[in-house]
Amino acid sequence: MEFIKDPILGDHFIQIDEYNYSAFKTIIPDSGIPYEHCIGHFPSLGLALKKIADHTMKGRSYDSIKKYIEEYNQILNKFNKYFL
């Protein structure tokens, strides 16, 4: 299996096999022992990157939908520039 581990993905990475692209997030709990959490399996790199963008947006609060959409689009544009 191959992996895409790039600083632009933050604590996420993509595992590539002959059938799909699997998106993962590396989580470091209070115990300090990191583990990898699969956030989905996708038929294309673009869909895996979109899920990572979605996942990056979770866990934050926003003052407006406009602010949320602007930040989400910034993440997608950054991924498009470097990966697609």
Image: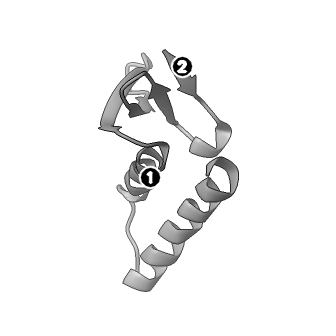
Q: What amino acid type is highlighted by mark number 1?
A: Thr
Mark 2: give few (<14), some (14-19) or many (20+) Cα within 10 Å.
few
Q: Given this view, does label 2 or label 1 mark the residue nearer the observer?
A: 2
Percent position (x, y) of residue 45? 48, 43
Report helix, strand or loop for mark 2: strand
Mark 1: give few (<14), some (14-19) or many (20+) Cα within 10 Å.
some
Instruction: Tell which of 33 and 66 is nearer to you.
Output: 66
Residue drawn where x is 51% and y is 33% of the image? 13
**Is 13 situated above or below 44?**
above
Residue drawn where x is 43% and y is 54% of the image? 50
Specify the label residue 21 is tagged with.
none
Report helix, strand or loop for mark 1: helix
Label 2, label 1: how many angstroms apart (C-alpha)?
22 Å
Is 17 situated left or right of 76 in this image? Answer: left
Residue 42 appears in the rendering: yes
Is 72 situated left or right of 55 in this image? Answer: right
Percent position (x, y) of residue 51? 38, 50
Q: What amino acid type is highlighted by mark number 2?
A: Glu
| Residue under numbered circle 2 | 2
Specify the label residue 56 is tagged with.
1
Instruction: Tell which of 44 and 66 is nearer to you.
Output: 44
Could you say which quadrant of the image residue 19 lies in? Answer: top left
Is 35 situated left or right of 40 in this image? Answer: right
